[in-house]
Amino acid sequence: MDLLRIQGGVPIRGETRVYGAKNAALPILAATVMAAGTSIIEDVPNLEDVRVMMQILEQLGARVRWYNASSVEVDASSIHSTNVPADLMQRMRSSIFLMGPLLARFGDVTLSKPGGCVIGQRPIDYHLHGMRQLGAKIDERHGYIRCSARRLVGTSITLDFPSVGATENLMMAAALADGVTVIENAAREPEVEDLGQFLMASGAVIEGAGSDTVVIHGCSHLHGTTYQIIPDRIVTGTLMLAAAATRGEVTVLGARLNHLGAIVQKLRDTGVRVDVDRDIITVKCDETPQAVDFRTAPFPGFPTDLQAPFMALLTTSSGTSVIHESVFEARFKHVDELKRMGADIAVDMRTAVVRGVPTLSGARVTASDLRGGAALLVAALMAEGTTEVDGVKHIDRGYQSIEEHLVMLGARIERVCV
Ligand SMILES: CC(=O)N[C@H]1[C@@H](OP(=O)(O)OP(=O)(O)OC[C@H]2O[C@@H](n3ccc(=O)[nH]c3=O)[C@H](O)[C@@H]2O)O[C@H](CO)[C@@H](O)[C@@H]1O
Ligand SMILES: C=C(OP(=O)(O)O)C(=O)O
């Protein structure tokens, strides 16, 4: 079991390049099973969830390998199973992305409830309801879910909430259905658009991916392709927040401003300086940030995945901030740990009130989910003294060699095997 030991109070400085987005890489890797050929996905981050997805693809019979340090090659022509192993389903939420692609290509898939960050109930009812609307028969028993269909038929689907995962799963299933599928109230996240771009590069016909109405014209087959995924906006945001929290100056290369509007705006509202020059973002902070209020919302709103790291920054701001978490009902697990470090935070249901304190102090804390873990790192980097962050496996699910990345920026952080 690993923990991260951080000597806080050191401003981070320097230049770093952001790698590809986990939340784009995972559905795109799952979608490679739809092509009876070889796909090469570039800019794939080497992190735990990606490794689990590669293991799943291998167990289904695909030939999967790192083509080079940041590209993954998947040859899906040899797939011989449509059964996603239960132990791998448990390892991450994104295992659910196998549902649409396997059903679409083979007419059959058996899986179980996915694991992943415990940040709310996270049901999969929109996914299942949409698959039924496309003509799939769903059989749920003994914890297993079997979806089957002789053929999927295009239809009109309106989501109750713009779920990222459901939009992506249904887009993938509909890509090989007969006829046209329209998804209304679709999620508009950049990762949804990226999946759409990948599917189109593989031969699918899709309009509007990344808008609230996606139209998918089903086709008979997809082919292999080479595709580069988008930069990770959540990693970019985390680095920007770490720079501000430590009162440092960091330049992130390869970012996409149009994916980061809400976070750039909110950071500027705190008084932190954010300069943007095409795909280069520089964050500089030499004064105490001002308190700000925000509420998380689907894109282009403030991303729920940066709620916890932003809260960490606000713990030492000047004034009182009110944060409302509107996407997940239980995404405040980091609060008690931040309080252990001296933060003053009160939570009432989905609202957190953060009263800024002059400094945090190092403590032993435990990450219990991915972005909550990132928040603890941001807090640890600015705290006085030493912080030990336990539960690093959660952070490793979504950040590639996080300590190496931060050490390059001058952070004093080491991974300790206990
Ligand atoms: C791998 C990936 O891309 N993960 C992201 C994805 O998760 P994920 O795709 O799981 O998130 P969703 O957008 O589906 O969830 C949003 C809300 O809808 C609810 N819901 C969702 C599906 C469903 O069938 N029924 C239902 O009620 C969820 O419980 C949640 O309250 O989008 C989230 C919201 O931006 C991000 O925090 C995650 O990082
Ligand atoms: C919640 C997240 O991931 P997942 O949906 O894979 O659990 C996340 O990336 O913050």
Image (spheres, rainbow, N blue to C red):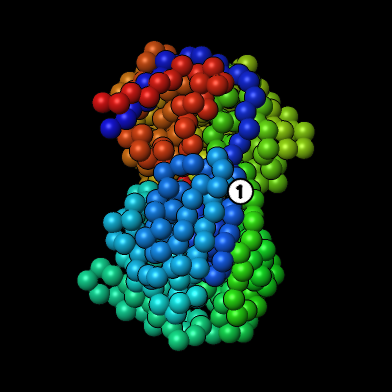
Residue drawn at x 54%, y 17% as measured from the top left:
410
Residue drawn at x 30%, y 26% as measured from the top left:
417
Quadrant location of the C terminus? Answer: top left
Q: Residue furthest right?
A: 277
Q: Residue furthest left?
A: 142
Residue 359 rendering spot, x and y as whole percentages: 45, 17
Residue 180 quadrant? bottom right
Residue drawn at x 36%, y 79% as measured from the top left:
138
Quadrant location of the N terminus? Answer: top left
Amino acid bearing label 1: Glu
Residue 215 higher or lower than 324, as above or below: below
Total of numbered circles in the picture?
1
36 vs 148, nearest the viewer: 36
Observer able to see residue 119: no
Report the side of 319 relative to 396 (left or right).
right
Kindly state the secondary structure of the residue where label 1 is placed: strand
Residue drawn at x 64%, y 55% as measured from the top left:
227
Report the side of 277 relative to 91 (left or right).
right
Residue 164 rendering spot, x and y as whole percentages: 52, 59
Q: Is mark 1 within 8 Å of ligand 1?
A: no
Residue 10 rendering spot, x and y as whole percentages: 51, 14
314 vs 283, nearest the viewer: 283
Residue 100 rendering spot, x and y as whole percentages: 48, 70
Residue 375 quadrant? top left
Q: Dot 1: within a 10 Å radius of its alpha carbon, few (fewer than 14), some, or many (20 or more) residues?
A: many
395 vs 354, nearest the viewer: 395
Observer able to see residue 411: yes
Report the side of 52 relative to 191 (left or right).
left
Report the side of 120 relative to 322 (left or right).
left
Residue 84 higher or lower than 132, as above or below: above
Residue receiving disc 1:
42
